[in-house]
Image (cartoon, rainbow, N blue to C red):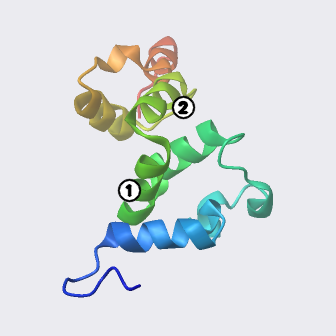
Amino acid sequence: MNHHIGREPKKDDHLATCMQHTHPTLLLRPSLFWDTNFNKLDMERHAAFIIVRVMERGTREEVQFVWQYYGAAIIKKHLLEAKFLHKKTISYFANKFAVSRTQFKSFQNREKVSTWP
């Protein structure tokens, strides 16, 4: 049965269909993970790594996919615990999560070093 009859398909419909028929990491660009073996990435075991990389360097679609896959609470947890985040990423997510930049471990690490790029 075609659930799109009578209406335009939504991006979320496409995402749900893709997730049912493919491994979730296939919805992410392998080039995003240039420094690791993409075929060995596991969405659960490597959640922190995937979340940080996508939130820092992903396309809008990749960010939306990761957001839908993990949810705000898990993303917040991993971003707050990340050892390094770009200052723009910290500022954006501090605003999004309504928290202080100082709550980010990576912000605290930057404060220990005398330079802030």
Residue 69 in picture, x, y percent from top left? 49, 49
Q: Disc 2 or 1, which lies upstream in sequence? A: 1
Graded by Cα atoms within 10 Å as few (under 14), some (14 to 19) or many (20 or more), the crowding at tag 2 reads some
Q: Nearer the viewer, residue 56 or 14?
A: 14
Image position of 42 (left or right of 96):
right
Q: Which of 19 and 84 is in front in this view?
A: 19
Residue drawn at x 59%, y 61% as measured from the top left: 32
Please, which residue is most extreme toward the front here?
A: 1
- Residue at label 2? 84
Q: Which of 12 and 41 is in front in this view?
A: 12
Image position of 4 with respect to 99: above or below: below
Q: Which mark is residue 25?
A: none
Please, which residue is most extreme toward the left here?
A: 6
Image position of 21 with respect to 25: above or below: below
Residue drawn at x 44%, y 58% as measured from the top left: 65
Image position of 64 with respect to 74: above or below: below
Quadrant of the rendering where the C terminus is positioned: top left
Q: Which of marks 2 and 1 is in front?
A: 1
- Residue at label 1? 64
Q: What element carries label 2?
A: loop
Residue 31 in picture, x, y percent from top left? 62, 68
Residue drawn at x 39%, y 65% as measured from the top left: 61
Q: What element carries label 1?
A: helix
Residue drawn at x 54%, y 31% as measured from the top left: 84
Residue 49 in picture, x, y percent from top left? 63, 41
Look at label 2 and name its amino acid. Answer: Phe
Q: In which quadrant of the rendered view does residue 40 lie?
A: bottom right
Look at label 1 and name its amino acid. Answer: Gln
